[in-house]
Image (spheres, rainbow, N blue to C red):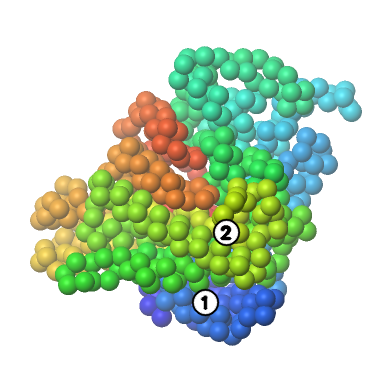
């Protein structure tokens, strides 16, 4: 295996089976064999050769061409057996509902999954509670209780829990929710996002007021100027990085099973919209492994990519059958829709190998063309599985149920996740993000990891400008801007996240979203000197570009707690994917 020292540190800290003293008792190869064997055991349910598929799965994993989400690496083939990363739980407006969901969330968090909640059904603060003749404390107060409980739950013995909290923009407590993380000591185990409607966005752009609706009565409680609320979202995101925005109507227009229910929340990283009590298994293709050289020109090897996508889709579908679900309701919902999320990592690496600047029209074109091919191959693979095994049980009445179209095995097939620690294992850039730094240090479970971009070192040697003095400067600054001796075209090729305009970040996110069933995890990085108006423009552009959500992060923001994108993290043990 080609594992870096950093990859080995991460594997030993988080993934390899340990003895009672905490010492690893399996090798990385044995870990991948454990995972492949467990997942391939599902083949026996359909009368297929599990040994043959075990070998194919193992080969894909051990070559680091594809990796599943972290819970699969941690738990597959072990007693816990919970291998899904993403969950959404409903929060009903009763004490039984609120604390019953908290109990269920504890089971999920303990197993290594991340949980998303919509608190939009809870009655607002100071609303009447007839059973006690008292007044309600509101959604934010219960989020704080969930946050405290998460503090004491250790995920699979390896990491802290991660949650997503969502509130509709038309909830009466929306302003309290928007400001909830201005105190960086509050809700440290939550990312929060406002569920923004089309009607709200229209009111923002037209300068109108909009209604706040009491979820208990369904009546309009008050009206606020939409721009004032939008400006408050912008101001808090500029200051702290929270809240993010999810465009909830855009998400539901892409809901593949509207006859089963409406989507109200996402997983902690925002890339996986899910119905209440639904789960999803994720995995990512390492794009940096799919380049071939014809003559002197590197090209994407689409033939090899297509073959491995077929194997990866089968791996993820098998994962649904072998998973040990924490709750029967979640098992029923997941097996009813059989959602999977095949994504990519190493996209920035791929562009560097191709010699294409991330910050260019060509870079966006590569993204659109590449994800289109991946989407087509993944859908074909799901349709072939449906031919062999049957469509997902809730297929009838779904968006896939149309004349002349083939049945589908999975209600959704593709997702762009942030990839977090699995990209360190695969030694590639995270998700579809540009490189955060050419050289950087990261903290993983109290172990400091230092990285220097291997593509930069390779090109520097090939072009003849490599020197130890140059590497020392790059290590100090993390970027090439202002460093003499580096050719201008190389500086453009290795632009870091904060050197790329917000507009280009959003164009890249939108290009991938065009060909992704679920959503796209992408951070819109802003320089320290960015203004609130820059944040507002980013939000509006993301909405009009067809994105399903948007997260901005201004350099130097005092954001603490659950930092879910790799470009933001200080401690990767907090990641959910």
Residue 537 shows which numbered tag? none
SS assignment at label 2: loop
* Residue 485 image-quadrant placement: bottom left
| Residue found 54% across the figure and 24% down from its top | 200
From the top left corner, tell me how far across and down residue 156 is, in percent: 64, 64
Q: Is residue 304 above or below residue 403?
A: below
| Residue found 29% across the figure and 39% down from its top | 501
From the top left corner, tell me how far across and down residue 190 is, in percent: 59, 44
| Residue found 45% across the figure and 28% down from its top | 234
Q: Which residue is mark 1?
A: 57
Q: Which residue is mark 2?
A: 406
In-front residue for pair 207/365: 365
Q: Is residue 435 left or right of residue 57?
A: left
From the top left corner, tell me how far across and down residue 93 is, in percent: 78, 35
Q: Is residue 123 left or right of residue 345?
A: right
SS assignment at label 1: helix
| Residue found 45% across the figure and 71% down from its top | 308
Q: Is disc 1 surrounded by few (<14), some (14 to 19) or many (20+) residues within 10 Å? A: many
In-front residue for pair 533/520: 520
Q: Is disc 2 surrounded by few (<14), some (14 to 19) or many (20+) residues within 10 Å? A: some
Say which of marks 2 and 1 sits in front: 2
From the top left corner, tell me how far across and down residue 405 is, in percent: 56, 55
């Amino acid at each position: 295996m080609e594992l870096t020292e950093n990859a080995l540190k991460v594997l030993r800290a988080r993934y390899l089976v340990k003895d009672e003293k905490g010492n690893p008792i399996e090798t990385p190869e044995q870990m991948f064999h454990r995972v492949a064997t467990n997942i391939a055991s599902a083949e026996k349910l359909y009368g297929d050769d599990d040994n043959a598929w075990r070998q194919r799965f193992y080969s894909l994993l051990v070559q680091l061409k594809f990796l599943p989400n972290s819970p699969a690496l941690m738990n597959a083939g072990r007693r816990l057996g919970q291998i899904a990363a993403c969950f959404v739980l409903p929060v009903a407006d009763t004490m039984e509902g609120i604390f019953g969901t908290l109990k269920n969330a504890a089971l999920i968090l303990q197993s290594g999954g991340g949980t998303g909640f919509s608190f939009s059904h809870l009655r607002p603060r100071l609303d009447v509670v007839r059973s006690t003749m008292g007044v309600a404390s509101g959604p934010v107060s219960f989020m704080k209780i969930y946050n405290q409980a998460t503090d004491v739950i250790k995920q699979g013995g390896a990491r802290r829990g991660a949650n997503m909290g969502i509130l509709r923009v038309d909830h009466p407590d929306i302003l309290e929710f928007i400001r909830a993380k201005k105190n960086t000591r509050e809700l440290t185990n939550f990312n929060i996002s406002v569920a923004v409607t089309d009607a709200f966005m229209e009111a923002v752009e037209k300068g109108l007021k909009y209604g706040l609706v009491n979820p208990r009565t369904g009546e309009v409680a008050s009206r606020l100027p939409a721009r004032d609320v939008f400006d408050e979202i912008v101001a808090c995101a500029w200051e702290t990085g929270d809240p993010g925005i999810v465009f909830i109507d855009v998400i539901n227009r892409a809901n593949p099973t509207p006859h089963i229910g409406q989507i109200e929340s996402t997983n902690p990283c925002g890339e996986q919209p899910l119905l209440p009590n639904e789960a999803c298994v994720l995995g990512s293709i390492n794009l940096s492994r799919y380049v071939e050289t014809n003559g002197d020109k590197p090209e994407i090897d689409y033939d090899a990519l297509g073959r491995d996508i077929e194997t990866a889709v089968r791996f993820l579908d098998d994962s649904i059958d072998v998973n040990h679900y924490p709750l029967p309701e979640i098992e029923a919902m997941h097996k009813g829709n059989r959602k999977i999320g095949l994504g990519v990592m190493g996209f920035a690496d791929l562009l560097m190998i191709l010699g294409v600047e991330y910050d260019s029209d060509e870079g966006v074109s590569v993204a659109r063309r590449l994800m289109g091919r991946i989407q087509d191959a993944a859908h074909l693979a799901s349709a072939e599985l449906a031919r062999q095994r049957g469509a997902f049980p809730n297929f009838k009445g779904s968006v896939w149920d149309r004349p002349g179209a083939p049945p589908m095995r999975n209600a959704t097939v593709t997702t762009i996740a942030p990839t977090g620690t699995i990209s360190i294992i695969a030694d590639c850039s995270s998700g579809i993000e540009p490189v955060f730094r050419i050289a950087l240090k990261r903290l993983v479970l109290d172990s400091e990891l230092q990285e220097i971009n291997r593509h930069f070192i390779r090109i520097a040697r090939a072009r003849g400008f490599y020197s130890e003095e140059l590497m020392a400067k790059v290590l100090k600054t993390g970027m090439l801007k202002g460093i003499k001796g580096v050719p201008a075209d190389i500086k453009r090729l290795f632009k870091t996240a904060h050197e790329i305009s917000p507009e280009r970040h959003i164009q890249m996110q939108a290009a991938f979203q065009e060909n992704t069933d679920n959503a796209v995890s992408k951070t819109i990085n802003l320089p320290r000197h960015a203004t609130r108006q820059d944040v507002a423009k980013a939000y509006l552009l993301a909405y009009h570009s067809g994105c399903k959500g948007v997260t901005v992060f201004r350099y130097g923001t005092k954001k603490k707690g659950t930092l879910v994108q790799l470009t933001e993290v200080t401690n990767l043990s907090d990641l959910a994917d």
